[in-house]
Image: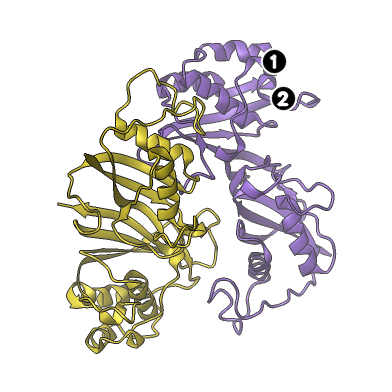
Chain colours: A yellow, B purple
């Protein structure tokens, strides 16, 4: 018998070559987590992410699932972890899911954190069962760099016409063929997706704008190309009406630039 | 004739050996800024900070002043900076103070930023004229590490009794001899300071507490020792009433531990 587990993850993607494991290297988020889980389980463990974030992209609420033998015993942690008190009350019997979470947090690098681990139904799959995802894209529009946000914001350094971007976003919302916004030229599956909302707002006090995209799923680089296109609208390098032509063309060349990875964060994945 | 300038600075102190220049090394904030200013001016420039932040301490609004020859011409920046658009409109005549700000931001590392530069009266001195300072100390009280805040928060990982801390803080507010809270054993000058307020609040959604200290000045390590002592009160390792004895003893050994540098941030310096 194997038990399926669902976990929620945070990571600052700056140092990593994206989510997806590539061979045996440890420079991916998936690779890092699988290495620690494998050590914990004493056997290889594969994790299934809700989607592959690109190199440099962050996550506030990535979801992944994995299977462990039902009878597995989690080794208790040494008394002093990185955070005093985290493992302070070992005498109290902890839930196995919390033991797994604490084990992972004790051995993962400090730019990856496990928020929660819970038991999931046997057939739960974090990618196949996801019904809605929320991505945020942060843009610094002022000339003054905020040193504390620099790893998670794109330093555009120019003001944006948010009204024009709002108009453009209304044309993107809904169910469309987003082929023009797909970074994978060889994509053979359907490029039809539904965007439920695009929220555009001034943020971070003085100098920032956050775009927040909610949809049933996103193609490779799609949020970054949507953002790049909306930035070009906001800089008056293209009209908001041009969105119609871009969607119709089904041609990546028609859309805007791929906004840099550092501004992007996978915030939430929802399940029924 | 020399012109005095006042500048406001942000820095993430993680990589640095504190504010104060030590010899010719470039691992201090002061050293880094002076090196860039000296290159700009073609002669050595000394900057005077409002206070020396410790190694690893951050600043949201550090203030420093420096003198430049009144007739100085600032070299214009190359057209493409790190932030596209920052130097986009060179044809418009910029104010000299903005030129200095942009020059510094173009050549300083990305964890140091100049928020503003303005002309100051000849006798303005950022340390001697400061009348009020605000420091914030951030504590992570939950077991879940927030990966995006990890450089600017102290990972305590235990809940705190904020009411007890509040009681203790009331005994600290006012004008006292804070010798027990001074990290410099050889301090020969007065250790009397006035704390105007200590604001204690739950922050960062789930897991954090921020202490915010406002006073007319702080001794070496004083905010970190105050914080360490308040944390011990919040963990019930000492009573809030013990603050009275600590103040009276005028003995560093009586106070609590020195909370780690990473949680501390100099937020504002005020002048009349």
Q: x, y (%) of residue B251?
A: 70, 15
Depth check: give the residue in front, B125 or B145.
B145
- Residue B250, which numbered label? 1
Depth check: give the residue in front, A79 or B224.
A79
Task: Please indicate, yes or no, whether residue B141 appears anywhere in the rendered image.
Answer: yes
Who's the residue at 52% across and 53% down the image? Answer: A148
Task: Please indicate, yes or no, whether residue B124 appears anywhere in the rendered image.
Answer: no
Do residues under tags 1 and 2 come within 8 Å of each other at their CB atoms? Answer: yes
Letter of the chain that mark 2 sits on in the rendering? B
In the rendered image, the quadrant that contains the C terminus of chain B is top right
Q: Nearer the viewer, mark 1 or mark 2?
A: 1
**Label 2: which residue?**
B191
Secondary structure under badge 2?
Answer: loop
Who's the residue at 49% across and 55% down the image? Answer: A26
Residue A130 vs A160, above or below: the answer is above
Q: x, y (%) of residue B161?
A: 41, 22
Are dots 1 and 2 on a single chain? yes
Letter of the chain that mark 1 sits on in the rendering? B
In the rendered image, the quadrant that contains the N terminus of chain B is bottom right
Residue A111 vs B196, above or below: the answer is below
Quadrant in which residue B93 is drawn: bottom right
Among numbered discs 1 and 2, the one appearing first in the sequence: 2
- Residue B97, which numbered label? none
């Amino acid at each position: 018998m194997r038990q399926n587990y669902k976990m929620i993850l945070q990571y600052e993607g700056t140092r990593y070559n994206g989510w997806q494991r590539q061979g045996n290297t440890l420079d991916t988020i998936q690779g890092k987590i699988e290495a620690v889980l494998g050590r914990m389980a004493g056997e290889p463990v594969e994790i299934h992410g809700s989607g592959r974030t690109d190199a440099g992209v962050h996550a506030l609420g990535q979801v992944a699932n994995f299977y462990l033998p039902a009878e597995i015993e989690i080794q208790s942690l040494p008394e002093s972890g990185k955070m005093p008190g985290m493992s302070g009350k070992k005498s109290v019997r902890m839930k196995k899911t919390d033991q797994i979470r604490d084990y992972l947090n004790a051995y993962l690098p400090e730019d990856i954190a496990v928020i929660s681990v819970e038991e999931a139904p046997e057939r739960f799959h974090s990618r196949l069962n996801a019904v809605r995802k929320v991505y945020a894209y942060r843009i610094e529009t002022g000339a003054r760099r905020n040193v504390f946000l620099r790893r998670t914001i794109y330093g555009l350094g120019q003001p944006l016409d948010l009204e024009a971007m709002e108009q453009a976003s209304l044309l993107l919302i809904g169910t469309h063929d987003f082929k023009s916004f797909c970074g994978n030229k060889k994509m053979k599956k359907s490029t039809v997706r539904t965007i439920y909302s695009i929220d555009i707002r001034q943020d971070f006090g003085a100098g920032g704008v956050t775009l927040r995209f909610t949809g049933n799923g996103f193609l490779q680089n799609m949020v970054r190309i949507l953002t790049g296109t909306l930035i070009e609208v906001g800089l008056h390098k293209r009209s908001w009406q041009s969105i119609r032509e871009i969607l119709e063309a089904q041609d990546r060349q028609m859309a805007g630039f791929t906004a840099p990875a550092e501004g992007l964060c996978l915030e939430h994945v929802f399940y029924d």
